Amino acid sequence: MKQLFSFIRKEFHHIFRDKATVMILLMMPIIQIILFGFALSQEVKNTKVVVLSTTSDEATRRIINRIDASEYFDVVGTVHNSDEIDAAFRDGKAKLAMIFEDHFSENLKHTGKSHIQLIADATDPNAANSFMFYASNIISNYQQDISQPQSGGGMIVPEVKMLYNPQMLSAFNFVPGVLGMIMILICAMMTSIAIVREKEMGTMEILLVSPMKPMYTILSKISPYFVLSVINFATIMLLSVFVLKVPIAGSFISLLIVSLLYIFVALALGLLISTVTNSQLAAMMISGMGLMIPVMLLSGMIFPIENMPAFLRFISNFVPARWYIDAVKTIMIKGLGLGAVLKDVGVLLLMATVLVTISLKKFKVRLE
């Protein structure tokens, strides 16, 4: 029995010697329960709405107030023409537009019928269906209230229009998400494992003392994964266009530039992981589980970011895939150019600069 306890004690010493692995084992369940508990929600909340109304009458004000008072919507402003609506959708300032017909209240009183057009950004078809359903229900509830005998009655007819994805194909949503997840996993995980493997095998010192400069050694390790990611990008694009029928509505050159930048960010992230881990297991857990879950839950790939609590929305700003997926949707689905994704490109450039700087500072030319 004494021998058994001595072996158990030895195993504990062996586990706790690798602090990175211990932190992963203890913190991962906490992080997962928080992410899955708060991020996994198909409800839509805080959906940005713009309103176009030529007349400010009592009926339109009541409907707008009901929409704004709902937890599902946030009326961010009014517009004056269809061009401003298009601009709001392009800039990401709105997900839903409500257009009241001329003389809305008068038509409701005198003819008994008025129309409201609802235009939704359907790049995420599930979210679009949800907030169209909620908006229609709010309008329907208002109609029931005014249908009371003392109110005079009236029927409001909502006209639904799905923008960018009128056929409501789910591929329009998951293709950018899958693209972002595959490239960051291949680049970050495989790069970090490849470098850490050299440390474990004891061959990294040999590489570092070779005539080739250390930086060239690192570049030689990450270059194959850059090429593999470019091939994966081309493969996904071909399958998306010719099999899934998802067109590249915008500039392919712009899409390629953003994708190459994202690959570079993922490679820098993998390099950073390799500098803070000394075992392939730790590198795999950090780059695999540690990256895949945030990419799936906090990038907008599956669940809208607007639905999440404020602290998760803040954390999502540090997930590179969030900015890349948003840029891909803007270029590929909405049909816009590089100028429309300057914010996303700027954030990715900043991330690349920070990750490379930290990685180079932490990288040890001489191993202990």
Image: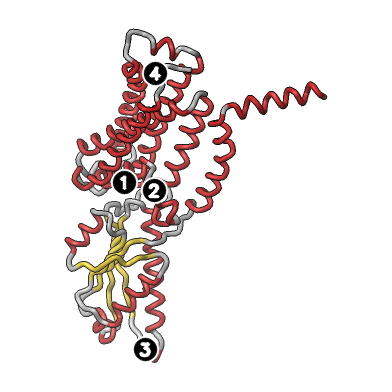
Per the rendering, the mark at residue 365 is 4
x%, y% of residue 325?
Answer: 33, 43
Q: Earlier in the sequence, mark 1 or mark 3?
A: 3
Is label 4 or label 2 in front?
4
The answer for how far apart the CA atoms under marks 2 and 3 are is 43 Å
Q: Earlier in the sequence, mark 3 or mark 4?
A: 3
What residue sits right under mark 1 in the picture? Answer: 326
Is label 3 or label 4 in front?
4
What residue sits right under mark 3 in the picture? Answer: 151
Question: Secondary structure beneath disc 4?
Answer: loop
Is label 2 or label 3 in front?
2
Q: Amino acid at mark 2?
A: Gly
- Hey, which quadrant is residue 61 in on the image? bottom left
Q: Amino acid at mark 4?
A: Val
Is label 1 or label 3 in front?
1
Q: Earlier in the sequence, mark 1 or mark 4?
A: 1
Point 42% across, 59% down: residue: 44
Q: How many marks?
A: 4
Point 27% across, 32% down: residue: 260
